[in-house]
Amino acid sequence: MSKLNKKNKVVVGIVVSVFLIGLILLNIHLFTLQSVKQFMEVPIIRLNSEYTSIVDKQNKYLGHPDMVLTDDNTLFTFYPSGHGKGAIIGKVSKDGGESWQDIEQLPVSWEKSQETPCVYNIHKTDGTSILVLTSGSPYWSDINLMPDGFNCAVSLDNGKTWSEFENWYGQEWAENKNKENNTDIYAAYDAIVAMSSLTQLKDEKGNLIDKWMGTFHRGTSEFGMDGGESYVNYKTYLTFDEDNNAVWSEPERLFDSYRELEEKYGMCEIEIIRNPKDDCLILFARANNRQSNSVVCYSFDEGFKWSQPKELPNCLTGDRHKAEYDAVSGKVLISFRQYLSNNDKFKQSALSPQMYLSEGWVAWIGTFEDLMSFEDDDKSNDSYGDAVVILGKNYNKADCGYSGVVVKEDGTIIMDSYGYFSPTTRYPYIMQAKFKIADIIK
């Protein structure tokens, strides 16, 4: 046999071996492949593209929007020009989200925003309406070497004009406290996603009062108040002086009674919605240690005490929950980034390095009764809701899903989020979803 024939046989043998190994690996992948659908306790619905539209798409990273509806029926959405940090971009819509226009002039101080903006329409008991926009100033290794509390701006004219940022509990506050008390123990607060929720409170008689509870969490750096501790959640109370200037109380810990669980789960990005029937505050938290599902707690005393944190079902697990009630359908809609990760339980396949499952930006739809069913320890009574709706399939890992959610009086739901909602897009962009629950759940 010639040397050439021997060489050809070796080459053929190698090719055959590689093919067989590839075939075996492919079969292992396919045999162990997992999908989100098999872990959902409720049906999955994919939102038809007729209900979605693009709000903003540029040749750069756009992310983490929030949205608000004013009393004159104007929509505003704000988001950073970057991942979490970056100058705030504003868009306005006067036709219910059918079209969006740039806001040409925003406060100069907003150009140096260092966190995701959160915006709310505050209704005082005297009928006054105030828009409140907040943005944290946490430790960032590249731009903010020390935490600097959080910033707040307000609008008294339905968003036509805004105040410049006023800083709260940052470096200047800490320095003044140290001078007053001749000590150096005070540090600025390391505020991330401030205010992730803002909840109007009630008095002992059950009447709404002019006081709102806001929440944020600190990071995992050694800097700032409670430096060295990870995933500490705070509450701060918002009130207004006689000139309608915002006044924030000094932050205090939210979960002192369950500090071990708070740190174990990595609880953060708190969202709170009030169940009016039971007058109960329902709290959702991202579980950022990725060793469990998302977490829920309940409070029947306006947030002074909370029930022990417990894990939510898969259909409600993910990051940055935003919950709103639709009085027309009687349903609660909770928008979030889907992220199923519990060690390797939700691994895509035996051969995949991706240690989570996600369809991207989703919304859970159900009732307050469903949400209250998780309060006790009897899982046989758990009620999982109607469906999980895939609002925007994300094509770059799970970088998406922070959203603004507005529910109009006629039941129209308008939301926007950021994400890689196209398989060919280079940067994430802002997409809107607009529908009525009756459009998708018959």
Image (cartoon, rainbow, N blue to C red):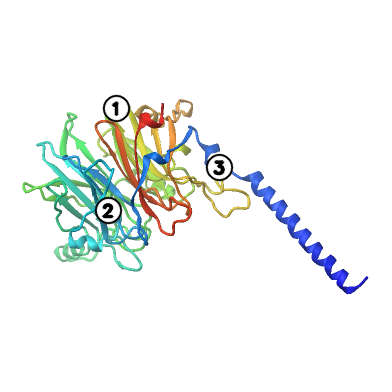
Q: Residue furthest bottom?
A: 3
Q: Residue sitting at 37 percent across and 39 percent down?
A: 51
Residue 309 shows in the view: no
| Mark 1 surroundings: few (<14), some (14-19) or many (≥20) residues within 10 A | some
Q: Is residue 148 left or right of residue 307?
A: left
Q: Which mark is residue 328?
A: 1
Disc 1 + disc 3, Cβ < 8 Å: no
Q: Nearer the viewer, residue 45 or 341?
A: 45
Quadrant of the image for the N terminus?
bottom right
Q: Amino acid at mark 1?
A: Val
Give the alpha-carbon distance from disc 2 to disc 1, as whole Å: 29 Å
Give the alpha-carbon distance from disc 2 to disc 3, as whole Å: 33 Å
Disc 2 + disc 1, Cβ < 8 Å: no
Label 1: which secondary element: loop
Residue 29 shows in the view: yes
Disc 2 + disc 3, Cβ < 8 Å: no
User: In the rendering, at what x and y percent does residue 266 appear?
Assistant: 41, 50
Q: Residue furthest right?
A: 1
Q: Amino acid at mark 3?
A: Ser
The image quarter in which residue 141 lies: bottom left
Q: Nearer the viewer, residue 409 or 151?
A: 409
Q: Which mark is residue 35?
A: 3
Label 3: which secondary element: loop
Nearer the viewer's eye, disc 2 or disc 1?
1
Q: Which mark is residue 117?
A: 2
User: In the rendering, at what x and y percent does residue 196 appear?
Assistant: 30, 47
Quadrant of the image for the C terminus?
top left
